[in-house]
Image (cartoon, rainbow, N blue to C red):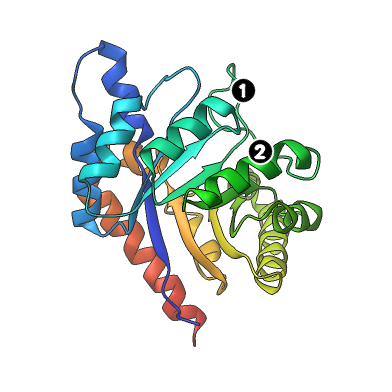
Amino acid sequence: MSNSLRLGVNIDHVATVRNARGGMQPDPFRAAQIAIEAGADGITAHLREDRRHIRDNDIERLKNEIAAPLNMEMAATPEMVEIARRTRPHAVCLVPEKRQELTTEGGLNVAGGHNHILPIVQSLNDAGIRVSLFIEADRQQIDAAVSVGASVIELHTGTYCDADPANREIELERLKTAAAYADQAGLECHAGHGLSFETVKPVAAIPVVRELNIGHFLIGEAIFVGLTESIKIMRGLMNDARSESKK
């Protein structure tokens, strides 16, 4: 297995700033271009039901014009399935979505929603779209991901990132155990949510994790150091973690 680790940069909150004024700036597409030039392997964008940040035309432009794979995050709804099948992003990541939440809260309950999620995954697979499920580090959810036909899971790292120092190691072990279990089950394992310069290296060092998706922190850090620099620092920390894990 290759020891490389991909970085997907989520540009949602460039669109959040744009939409705050209702105009065209800052441009999420420009952010995607800068991210790719700075070392991102792919671009992630979440098309929400209420279109609070990314809009339909953003997804279409990103799919058609960026020189990197597009990972479209979306809720498991008929509307979003139709958009994904029409737009054909490289990948779709199904996430839980509540209108009132500020950001995604926890993982998708695949085990509890098996009969709803199964035909959605099948429809996306039939369209040639790779399907990922954003889930907690839980064996039951991993087993359910296999049963609905997903090829990828993304482990929710928010609990690990938010934990106090005394409990962070416990949460990290949960992620390691779940990643190993997913790998044994034949799933490609990704991780993301809340990762920062401080928290990324232990997750990046998990050998079976193939991709990290990071957005809010990088966009926030860009206010101070610029988007190119924030991504280059993150890319460097990820690379260092992989190199150190091989020693």
Secondary structure beneath label 1: loop
Estimate how packed mark 1 is, as few (under 14), some (14 to 19) or many (20 or more) residues with alpha carbons within 10 Å: some
Q: Position of residue 48 (x, y in %)?
A: 48, 26
Q: Position of residue 47 (x, y in %)?
A: 44, 30
- Identify the mark at residue 106; answer none if there is no mark: 2
Q: Which residue is mark 1?
A: 98
**First of labels 2, 1 by sequence position:** 1
- Identify the mark at residue 130; answer none if there is no mark: none
Secondary structure beneath label 2: loop
Residue 59 in the figure: left or right of residue 35: right
Give the quarter of the image for residue 30. Answer: top left
60, above or below 99, in the image: below
Estimate how packed mark 2 is, as few (under 14), some (14 to 19) or many (20 or more) residues with alpha carbons within 10 Å: some
Give the amino acid type for the residue marked by disc 2 in the picture.
Gly
Residue 218 visible in this rendered orientation of the protein: yes
Q: Residue at x 38, y 24 (%)?
A: 53
